[in-house]
Amino acid sequence: MSVEQPVSVRPAPFSGPGGYWGRLLPVLLLLAAVTRLPSFVHPLWNPDEGFLAVQARQLAAGGVLYDTVVDRKPPFVPWLYEGVFAVFGDGSLVPVKILAILALFATAGLLASLARRRWGDRSGVVAGVGFLLISVGLHPEDTQAAGFGLFMLPFTALAVWCADRRAWTWAGVAVAGAFLTKQTGGAVLVPVVWLAWTTASGARGRALLRIVAGFAVPVAATALITGPSGFLFWVVTGSGSYADLTGSGLHALGRGFGNALILAGACLGLLIPLVRRLRAPGADLWLWLAASAVAVMTGFHFFGHYYLQLMPPLALLGTAALHALPRRWTPAALTLTACTCAAFLTWGFLAPRPELAHAQRVAEAVRARTAPTDRVLIWGMHPETYWLADRTPASRYLTAGLLTNFSGGRTGSQVGEEYGVEGSWPLLRTELAQHRPAVIVDDSRGKPYAPDRMPTLRQVLAADYVRAATIDGTVIYVRAPAKDVGAPAKDVRPPDVDVRPPGKP
């Protein structure tokens, strides 16, 4: 009588005590924290973080979103900053940076779950780890900032995760979350609808209706909370001139091509297997990548942080390709991806931040010339100066871009008072008359929005202000002494001007 010998089975990755998730999730959390370490080197990384920090302070002081607090972005991240500041104080972005770690961790966990469900335990590890390794694969200002693009990622991953499990209503809610974080996050609706369409024909209609309902209810509720007209204008319809790159197309396309090359270098360990297996399974994943690519191109600015939303579908497609290839490909791919990750982390630690240093010097000069209760106007593209100086903005328009249509992706064409947000200049005149700034900072430094090209601002400076200092090309103006003493604020608003905020009936 023979005795059957036990079959030797190679253990699955992360099997053993604690189970699959008990062992994988701590690794993903640790890796997410490591990839975000450079974010703690500086108080903030880019103007978006500064914009959000100032917005949060305005909201906490009684400001109204899309009325006295404005930006061309949905409300979720400003509300997030406001909530964090309410709990931890508004003097540091460290708590927000920790939330950014958790956002990356959540995204990695959802991608790992998707990959494990489709291709097995090992693929779950590859997807989660691979995503975190490529998450630093752009300029540090784009990957280390706790901005809109980063906080959008867990919602996009959750939307596909829910659709993969046929939880259609929750998939729609997750799409709404992505859209309410950043408009282009709504692109994830494409793979979600595709997955619904591939269900049995009898259930297809119900699935689509549930997705629509799950999306529509949170968006409609948010519009009602913030005011439908203001929400529609600032989130949907008010960015037409911003998306027009007349005369600046080559400049933007060059940046777009450069950022695409940087991301491709960071993802090389996953792209090589994907090219080897272009027929990797998952039509929904290819649609997710294609829709995200269209979202990156929307607006024709091609800023680096736009490319963040390409990373989740790239991680899953690379995982699918590795699953279809011989097993020896996986350690080689992850090793190469880890090496590129280390290079980008080194870049993050060593990258100079001249604009931050400049903003800090200007903020120090503003603090020295103002009292804590004074209002100031920073005429430039660095709203973080308000936050660094701990001074209240004199206007709801925190950058010259909203008033002139200037952005980092634009040359001198289509820039001026006539190209600003509709109704913004009459409102600015009213604000400056009601709350005359103690200091006006001209931070244009030769850019096309310099005050000598803006008649209204040039008039205000000539009538009430004198030059007090120059810091690296930035000119600081203070109120003229003779007009500070007992003189009423001059109302520079022309008569019979409609000064309702844009989007207000």
Image (cartoon, grey):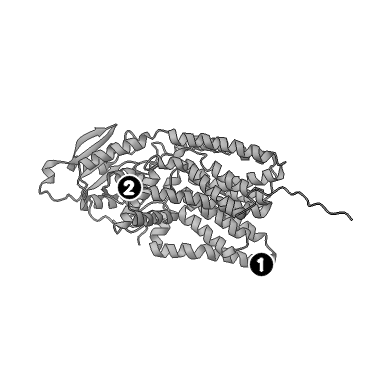
Q: What quarter of the picture does the C terminus occupy?
A: bottom left
Q: Amino acid at mark 1?
A: Ala
Badge 1 crowding class, 10 Å Cα cut-off, few under 14, some 14 to 19, many 20 or more, is: few
Instruction: Left or right? Give the position of 327 relative to 32.
Output: right
Q: What quarter of the picture does the N terminus occupy?
A: bottom right
Residue in view at x 45 percent, y 46 percent = 243
Q: Looking at this rendering, what residue extends furthest in the top direction?
A: 472
Q: Looking at this rendering, what residue extends furthest in the front direction?
A: 1
Residue in view at x 68 percent, y 49 percent = 12
Mark 1 and mark 2 lie on one chain; the one further toward the N terminus is 1
Q: Are marks 1 and 2 in contact (CB under 8 Å)?
A: no
Instruction: Left or right? Give the position of 381 relative to 24.
Output: left
Q: Amino acid at mark 2?
A: Leu
Number of dots carrying numbers: 2
Residue 420 horizontal/vertical position (percent) = 35, 47
Question: Foreground: 434 or 161?
Answer: 161
Q: Find disc 1 in the rendering and name its residue.
A: 203
| 29 w.r.t. 164: above or below | above
**Mark 2 residue element:** loop
Residue 200 horizontal/vertical position (percent) = 69, 64
Instruction: Left or right? Give the position of 279 relative to 502.
Output: right
| 300 w.r.t. 238: above or below | above
| 348 w.r.t. 183: above or below | above
Question: Foreground: 384 or 253?
Answer: 384
Q: Is residue 459 visible?
A: no
Q: Find disc 2 in the rendering and name its residue.
A: 398
Residue 259 horizontal/vertical position (percent) = 51, 37
Residue in view at x 10 percent, y 49 percent = 486
Residue 336 horizontal/vertical position (percent) = 60, 36
**Mark 1 residue element:** helix
Question: Foreground: 342 or 208?
Answer: 342
